[in-house]
Image (tube, rainbow, N blue to C red):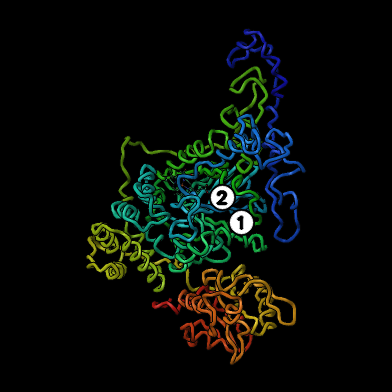
Amino acid sequence: MAGKNSGKAAAKQADVDEAIPGKPTPQAPTVEEPTEVRGPLPPKPDQDAPQTVSPTGQATGAERAAMAQGGSFLTTAQGNRLHDTNHSLKAGPRGPVLLQDHHLREKITHFDHERIPERVVHARGAAAHGVFRAYGTAAKIAKAAFLAADVETPVFVRFSTVLGSRGSADTVRDTRGFATKFYTTEGTFDLVGNNIPVFFIQDAIKFPDVIHAGKPHPDREIPQAQSAHDTFWDFVTLHTEATHHTLWNMSDRGIPRSFRMMEGFGVHTFRLVNAEGGTTLVKFHWKPRLGVHSLVWEEAQITNGMDPDFHRRDLADAIEAGAFPQWELAVQTFPDNPEQTFEGIDLLDPTNIVPEELAPVQPIGLLTLNANPTNFFAETEQVAFHPGHLVPGIDVTDDPLLAGRLFSYLDTQITRLAGPNFAQIPVNRTHAPVNDMLRDGFHQDAVHTGVAPYRPNSLDGGCPFLAGADTGAYIEVPVELPAAKKVREAPASFDDHFSQPRRFWLSMSPVEREHIIGAYTFELNKCYEQAIKERALQVLANIDPELCEGVAAGLGLPAPEADRPLASVDPSPALSQIGRSWPLEGRMIGIVADDNGDLDAVRDLRRRVLEAGMVPLVIAPAGGKLDQNGEPITVQRTFATARSIEFDAVILAGTPGPGKDAYGARDAKAGDPAVAGRTETDPRVLLMLSEAYRHGKPLGGWAGAEEVFHAAGVPTAAPGVALGSDGPGTLNQVTQLLGKHRVWERFSAHA
Ligand code: HDE
């Protein structure tokens, strides 16, 4: 319709003047309806909606998706067919390359520009597509269409670490990003959260500072993706508001077992608005169906070397296997009082949580991730989140950290995605109709029609019109603000930096406290500056003397006294990760096997592990198949490629009988000089068992397994070592143990 009016560009000036509001417009067309909005931009033919091989085996366009290109012939970007892409055009086979080789120039030029700047933070990430189904339980407090009962909304979720570069390892000690893009019918809503519910700073103006402190040192650019260095600890001990977030980072939350097994938090307090205009303050939570689980520190460090893509692989493998990760979206609700506090907790201070025991976490919908991205760059790398992408029914509060974020995300994409049109990139395209007046700019893909991208106008029939509350407009809540002076100050309530950390510490079980002490001790021992270590101990003394003394002992320094009264707070049991049993879907069970052993038992064990929804990985001296007489068993890991970190539990299956070499003889046969002539269990198997034991993982075996455990230094009477009489019985014991994630009794401080 806009195009229809373009002929009016030649309208006489007098007609235009008369169309301006306020002037009589006798000839102006009467427009009853707004211009037809155009639908979301369709994907380009070569950028169809992401397709993956369906995890349940129904391939949806898989053949096409599996190929890098469509069509039979290789072409240039302009569609000219090519007959050679391996030789440059030369003056004779040994002669100089000719400048006129347009294919060479196009190929190299395009390659030269393949990289874009990585994200300034959260550069390392992995993502998946999915669907969010609302329970309708939030409909009374939020009018957002996607929160109404049973509405299904497509989503794209990106998980990330914060400090590391794009190629850094996954299992570093760090906060994890948990950013969700909901493609709702009313426009895109982004919930850009983290796996830790609080933040280091209370005011966005310090964000460049905290990130400069956490990133590698500017001279040598080391260490990569680590907080264990002087500048980080310098910052967080000088800005004690960072104490709470730092404590969470030093807890097991800083090293999640899997993206599938971590919580997510919106961090800030948001304001929900219902159809009647009533408002409620809320904090958003994501609750994983598989529970909240972590690695242990040594395991995380080994993983960084053995499998730096551990979390990325885990997410993709689980989805491909059909073990779709799920989270419930939930809210804590608070009355929208003018003080914006709840039970004395300042809701505008992003270093605070509200304990679940004070404000229950109420589920409002279910997120299921069910498809891997088709192309990492197109989707995971180019996705652009923004906390300001809001829909009617969800508004922001005056948290000063959130205010800075509302500026930063849009701004950063302009550099990262080279211009202001990144909303047109397929993964960023809204699923709601678009009718904006934004024009031109780098990478403008739309061919806009009409001549009047301004309002009001007379040339495009006065369109587009503006919506009101009854026609789905986003209208900010008209919050009343107290009369105030313009100042650079924080409220006095932002000064309490220790009572919330103390609550967290008191809520931890003994083994979790032991891990926290270990983490602080490790990180501070990596610092060079004595003054920083001493300042850190003072901060810890203000949280709790046991914490401070434990770390001081590890640093070889005296423990200072608290320089203020310790806060009197109740623990929040919900903060502990230990004590419950959880589903085991997608857990990795290492099955150590050998041609020498009972392969029927190995086959049976594999089947039972699969039936329990877990993943069996057979580990044997060499690759290929284990095959005595029956159906061959595929070997997934050899003694050289396996390491304990990959498995949640290890079972010695079908141990060779007495007098036979257990797990080792075949290597010697395979001619591996490192083990030639060995007649004992391969040391790599022993290492795997002793590591798994040290990391609190369930171990199992039967028949001759006891001897192998002894050789590995694993006491068979220790908790969590399941010695059964056969495979099924052993597996039963192992799965019981695994439901609690780890054998906590193995750590010196018991849960
Ligand atoms: Fe971010 N943050 N952030 N952040 N953030 C970015 O935006 C920023 C903060 C979070 O997977 C950047 O697109 C400021 C809190 C996630 O693409 C940037 C402040 C929380 C992601 C930015 C914060 C987050 C980012 C870099 C302090 C949890 C990754 C690239 C005021 C609630 C999103 C980008 C993805 C990314 C700014 C603090 C979460 C620079 C200024 C608090 C999950 O715009």
**Which one is nearer the viewer's eye here, 627 or 671?**
671
In this rendering, the answer to whether 484 lies above or below 613 is above
Name the quarter where the C terminus is drawn. Answer: bottom left
The picture places residue 354, in percent across and down from the top left corner, at: 43, 58
In this rendering, the answer to whether 458 lies above or below 261 is above
**Which one is nearer the viewer's eye here, 89 or 47?**
89
Amino acid of disc 2: Thr
The picture places residue 237, in percent across and down from the top left corner, at: 29, 55
Name the quarter where the N terminus is drawn. Answer: top right
Describe the element under mark 1 as helix, strand or loop: strand
For the question of whether residue 121 can be seen, the reply is yes
Outermost residue toward the bottom in this view? 658
Which quarter of the picture shows residue 640? bottom right
Which quarter of the picture shows residue 115? top right
What separation in Å lies between label 2 and label 1 (alpha carbons)?
10 Å
**Residue displayed at 73% across by 39% down:** 83
- Circle 2/circle 1 CB separation < 8 Å: yes
Q: Is mark 1 within 8 Å of ligand 1?
A: no
**Residue 457 shown left or right of residue 236 in the figure:** right
The picture places residue 503, in percent across and down from the top left corner, at: 37, 64
Q: Which residue is mark 2?
A: 180
Amino acid of disc 1: Leu
Q: Which mark is residue 367?
A: 1
**Which one is nearer the viewer's eye here, 242 or 586?**
586
**Residue 10 shown left or right of residue 245 in the figure:** right
**Residue displayed at 65% across by 30% down:** 446
For the question of whether residue 470 can be seen, the reply is no
Q: Is mark 2 within 8 Å of ligand 1?
A: no
Describe the element under mark 2 as helix, strand or loop: strand
Q: Residues within 10 Å of mark 2 (few under 14, many from 20)?
A: many
In primary-sequence order, the first of circles 2 and 1 is 2
